[in-house]
Amino acid sequence: MSFEIQDLPDVIRVIILLNLRKGTKIKKIALKKRIDRVCIGYTSVEMAELNKTLDEMALEGLIAEKNDSVKLTKKGLRLGREWQSLLLKKEPILEIVAGLVDGSITGLVVIISSVIAALSTNVAIFAALLTLSAVAITNFSSFLLGGITEDMADIMTLQTLMSYSLSDNPNKKERNKSLILIKKLFVILDREIYRSNVYASIIVGTTTFVAGSVPIVLYLTLNQFYPFNIILSLGFVAIIVGFFLVRYRAKKTRVNWKMTFIETLAIISIATIASLILGGLV
């Protein structure tokens, strides 16, 4: 199955994939009720239309049927996750990357600043909490507000493209039903996208705080073992940046890890040095 939406079975198929994406088994009649709830009061999907779509999905290896129940196969689950990622933006790639980068930079700046300015433990703790909290809260709010705005714009564009593709269907009855289904489906997706953005904002805020706080905690709690506390805390940042962040980015972007490593190292180095210069410490 392609991602192109051209007729009613394609629309029904997307709704089925989104409803069964957790791998649950469901009776066909219960599945029909779920689909009808999408467009309640406007139109309804006939059982024959549902069975036709399920038969097509079974031939494509997307579902398995048994005793009047259906369940997504591994191929179906994979395709369902792709649709979920496309429509609901639930794969937190950007959030994790942003959290690790911002947290690592904040941790580096606080540690280096404490060493250069010879800050006492209490002052360093205050500076660390203030800086980390500010960065984490800023990331949370910017991802929440910006993410909702951007995702809503994307989803409106996607709805327009799908509706335009469906408008070519010569069968007027099927075309109208498909357009209603798409419209009502996207109304439901709007609410899902809001929840998804709240979830993403929590991820980026938490990741930022944890990635920055761990090396700072190592530096402060092992202060009596100077300079090993600096080596250990900076080593932890290096592990986060050099392994977790680079490996994660390389895997998700499918770019060679060496190129990703050089790019990531350059960005973090420039951002850290710029922060220290602006703070008057370099």
Image (tube, rainbow, N blue to C red):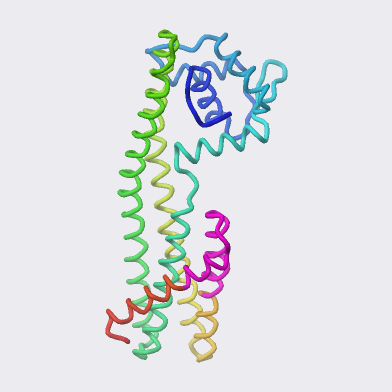
Prevailing secondary structure of the magenta residues: helix
Residue displayed at 63% across by 33% down: 23
Q: Quarter of the image holding residue 71?
A: top right
Q: Reply above or below: 270 against 31.
A: below
Question: From the image, which quarter does the C terminus lie in?
Answer: bottom left
Q: Residue 180, image x and y in percent?
A: 38, 18
Q: Quadrant of residue 40?
A: top left
Quarter of the figure with the N terminus: top right
Compared across the picture, whether 131 is left or right of 208 comes to: left
| Residue at figure coordinates x 33%, y 77% from the top left | 274
Left or right: residue 66 versus residue 269 is right
> How many circles with numbers are drawn on the protein?
0
Instruction: Tell which residue pokes out farthest to the right in this image.
Output: 66
Location of residue 132 (image quadrant): bottom left
Residue placed at 55% from the left, 11% from the top?
Answer: 49
Across and down, in percent, residue 162 comes to 41, 27
Q: Residue 251 lies in magenta, yes or no?
A: yes
Name the foreground residue: 7 vs 31. 7
Q: Nearer the viewer, residue 146 or 212?
A: 146
Q: Which residues are magenta?
A: 238-265
Q: Name the side, left or right, on which 132 lies relative to 243.
A: left
Note whether 62 is above or below 136 in the view shown. above
Q: Position of residue 251 (x, y in %)?
A: 58, 56
**Rendered residue at 43%/17% (across/down):** 178
Q: Position of residue 63 (x, y in %)?
A: 66, 26
- Is 164 a magenta residue? no
